[in-house]
Image (cartoon, helix red, strand yellow):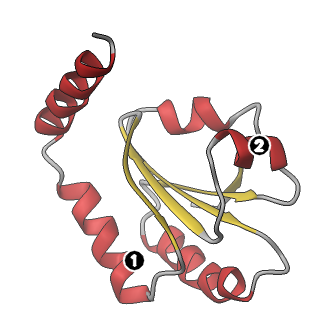
Amino acid sequence: MTLRTLNLADFLETVSAPGITFVDFWATWCPPCRAFGPVFEKAAQAHPDYTFAKVNTEEETELAGLLGITSIPTIMAFRDGIMVFRQPGALPANAFNQLIKEVADLDMAEVEAQAQKAEAATTR
C-alpha cells in the first residue's frame, strides 16, 4: 500500500473506516520525523492490508490544532474507528512493528465495551 496524505477534509473519514489505520503527524524541519519516515514507509509496504497515512503539521495546522498535536512526530493508531494508541516521539522499527502486532491482536469487543463505558461516564 502507498502512503496516504491526510488533510482536515478526509482525516475523519479515513480513521473512522473499518480496519486498522496508522497516522504519522510530522513536519519537514523535524529531524526525528525524518528519521521515523523510512520506518513508517517500510511498515506500510510490509502491511498492505492496513492504512498508513501522514499529516504534515505545517500544512495542516488546523487539523493538528484540533487534535492537540503539540509534539512531533506523533503516532496514532485507529482500529474500526476507535483510537487505540497515541504517542509523541519517533519509534524505532522494532517498537513500531510490535505496536502494529498489538493493534492487530486487540480484542475489539473489549475495546468497544471500554469505549462505551468511558462515553457513558462523560455524558452523566
Secondary structure found at label 2: loop
Q: Position of residue 65 (x, y in %)?
A: 73, 45
Tell me the tag on residue 25: none
Q: Residues within 10 Å of mark 2 (few under 14, many from 20)?
A: some
Q: Quadrant of the C terminus?
A: top left
Q: Residues within 10 Å of mark 1 (few under 14, many from 20)?
A: some
Question: Is residue 9 or residue 65 the one in the foreground?
Answer: 65
What residue occupies the far right of the structure in this picture?
A: 59
Res 46 seen here: yes
Residue 19 horizontal side relative to residue 65, left or right: left
What residue occupies the far front of the structure in this picture?
A: 124
Residue at 68%, 79% (x, y): give it.
33
**Whole-Å distance between the Cαs marked 2 and 1?**
23 Å
16 over 49 or under it: above or below: above
Residue 102 horizontal side relative to residue 17, left or right: left
Q: Position of residue 63 (x, y in %)?
A: 74, 42
Residue 4 position by quadrant:
bottom right
Q: Amino acid at mark 1?
A: Phe
Residue at 18%, 51% (x, y): give it.
106
Of label 2 and label 1, which has the lower sequence position? 2
Residue at 57%, 65% (x, y): give it.
74
Residue at 41%, 33% (x, y): give it.
81
Q: Amino acid at mark 2?
A: Asn
37 over 7 or under it: above or below: below
Residue 62 position by quadrant:
top right
Tell me the tag on residue 7: 2
